[in-house]
Amino acid sequence: MTEAAESTDVVRDVVIIGSGPAGYTAAIYAARANLNPLVVAGSVTAGGELMNTTDVENFPGFPEGIMGPELMSHLEKQATRFGAEVLYEDVVNVDLTTDPKVVTLGNGTEFRSHAVILATGSAYRELGVDGEKRFSGHGVSWCATCDGFFFRDQNIAVVGGGDSAMEEALFLTKFASTVTVIHRRDELRASKTMADRALAHEKINFVWDTEVTGLDGEDKLKSLGLRNLKTGAESTLDVTGLFVAIGSDPRVDLVRDQVELTDKGTIKVEYPSSRTSVPGVFAAGDVTDPTYRQAITAAGSGCVAAQDVEHYLADVKDLAAAAR
């Protein structure tokens, strides 16, 4: 980790906001192009969602699979090897309308750059039911790899029906006595491989067509209120742990009023490029992708963003030279 420097008059070629496969891949390519990229990785979100992932089995080059945090460590080391600078700080404000762009950190440090790559990823989605926030850290979690150990020999639940939910459920079987998957539909949205694994596991039970209506307990979670969406019947499920895996939302709050967004809330890019509606501003990874949301697609888009920045900076320099 590099300590944040004081504000200077130096204008950088590119600042990358966010890490994860998109941010670090962009940093690798930008560094190899001698653009001396600065990656503001985040104080808590560094590495992105893969930091909360167990076995990554579908990232090319790892036939035996690799742990998510280990993969991110490899990507970061590769980026810094080529000269990228990484700060574990949070960006609290950006001004993308100026030239150069201004990126401000939580400690007041400002960085100016000719180009910015937005690789801010996405945030876990909440259920929005009574008791969810109150029991956060006291029975409610969004990260099985972080908290699964604390639920050894307990009955727990997972909400969701996609790959992430099935991965959470399967991982939690290492600790829990039972895992109950609660899903709003009557079939899973997960890939066939993940769905088959979960459906066949002896510790995993399924509650279909059902939503969580509330959480109950005193100091810790004790039970869930459930409602069947087809019949309206209400019931209670006794569990001491609830893992929420219902997707995520793109992290666009920082730039919502400065770049154009899609109707799905992601940053709009001029596909197949990474160009946004603001010249000199590029975006990559899950913050642009509401569909695929895979580590390999995020990494690929990071590669695109870095090359787009390289071409943009070259064009700017050519125009400046021609104007002299």
Image: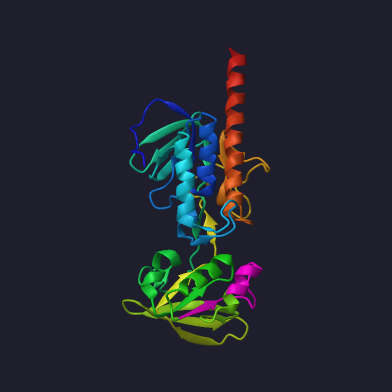
Question: Residue 274 is drawn in which quadrant?
Answer: top right
**Residue at position x 51%, y 67% from top?**
245
Q: Position of residue 61 (x, y in %)?
A: 58, 51
Q: Which residues are magenta?
A: 178-197
Q: Is residue 189 magenta?
A: yes
Residue 298, above or below 193? above
**Residue at position x 60%, y 35% from top?**
307
- Front-lying residue, 271 or 257: 271
- Quarter of the picture containing the N terminus is top left
Which residue appears farthest toward the front when viewing the image?
A: 64
Residue 45 in sight: yes
**Residue at position x 66%, y 41% from top?**
270
Q: Is residue 114 left or right of residue 239?
A: right
Which residue appears farthest toward the top when viewing the image?
A: 324
- The number of callouts visible is 0
**Residue at position x 38%, y 76% from top?**
152
Q: Position of residue 213 (x, y in %)?
A: 49, 78
Residue 44, above or below 191? above
Residue 55, above or below 300? below
Q: Is residue 15 magenta?
A: no
- Quarter of the picture containing the C terminus is top right
Residue 266 in sight: no
